[in-house]
Image (tube, rainbow, N blue to C red):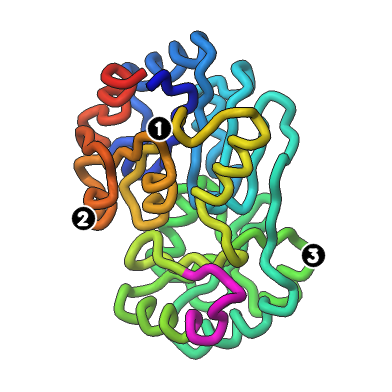
Amino acid sequence: MNYQILVLDLDGTLTNSEKKITPPTLEALIRIQENGKKVVLASGRPTYGVEPLARELHLERYGSYILSFNGARITDCRSGQIIYNRTLPADSIRPIYEIASKYPVDILAYGPSELISGLQINQYTEQESRINHIPIKQTDHFLDEVSSISNNKFLLTGEPAEIEKVRKEMISHFRGYLNIYCSEPFFLEIMPQNIDKAFSLQKLLNSIGLTADEMICCGDGYNDVTMIEYAGLGVAMQNAQPLVREKADYITKSNDEDGVLYVIEKFM
């Protein structure tokens, strides 16, 4: 298969343990774009948390794409145009907050230039802040703060045992209305219904005239499973969660061994 598009999760996939793209992988990704291939950075991060890596890879020069918020937003890097955008239903925001408030977890929204913490900042809130290079703004007026912004997703952070409890209650309450899942044991993603990486990639492929058979998707986390199953070639990193490796067509080297570079050299 002549693969035309390479979709990459970021943390644990494209970036190594230091959250960096190694020079050989960087050079290879620029080279395939020079040869007409498209690169998509597909992440649970907000758009501004992906943009520094997009600039490193010169996605704006080659007309590649950012798929952020686990697929709730797609951005054309060349034009800066948002070509797909889904937000949480307005009537879900208060009950999400009220359920989260019953547990020792934090609830995060993504402001224009800060991470809005609505409950109790914890180490996982701080981790999300570091990943995205944005400051935390703690507020006692979360519902007022988020009423004026575009809420593509909320993130609940906390100890895995508590996240599992709140996950079960959220799913029971919002079944069929919201998409709720863990991207990590300490991160609970609260998303618009039917939004995941595969759904949004289908939207993107339709808009640019490519098919899933022409696409390689690489990932390591639970939120990468749908795109790995959807892709013509679904690739799990060696460091991926066991379920992700089970679903993949191919297992590459780990993110600390230039696993993405290995995929490029073997398949593109």
158 part of magenta stretch: no
Q: Earlier in the sequence, mark 3 or mark 1?
A: 3
Percent coordinates x, y for residue 14 in the rendering: 37, 34
Question: Amino acid under label 3?
Answer: Ser
Residue 71 is labelled as none
Q: Which residue is mark 2?
A: 242
Percent coordinates x, y for residue 93 in the rendering: 67, 76
The answer for how far apart the CA atoms under marks 2 and 1 are is 19 Å
Q: Earlier in the sequence, mark 2 or mark 1?
A: 1
Q: Is residue 147 left or right of residue 78?
A: right
- At 35% from the left and 43% from the top, the residue drawn is 219
Q: Secondary structure at mark 2?
A: helix
Percent coordinates x, y for residue 32 in the rendering: 45, 14
Q: Quadrant of the C terminus?
A: top left
Please say whether residue 137 is visible from this viewpoint: no
- Circle 2 residues within 10 Å: few <14, some 14–19, many ≥20: few
The answer for how far apart the CA atoms under marks 2 and 3 are is 40 Å
Residue 216 is labelled as 1
Above or below residue 100? Residue 206 is above
Q: Secondary structure at mark 3?
A: loop
Q: Quadrant of the N terminus?
A: top left
Q: Which residue is mark 3?
A: 148
Residues at marks 2 and 3 touching, judged by CB atoms closer than 8 Å = no
The answer for how far apart the CA atoms under marks 3 and 1 are is 37 Å
User: What are the residue bounds of the magenta stretch?
Assistant: 170-180
- At 49% from the left and 77% from the top, the residue drawn is 120
Quarter assignment of residue 266: top left
Above or below residue 25? Residue 115 is below
- At 60% from the left and 62% from the top, the residue drawn is 153
Percent coordinates x, y for residue 210 in the rendering: 57, 29
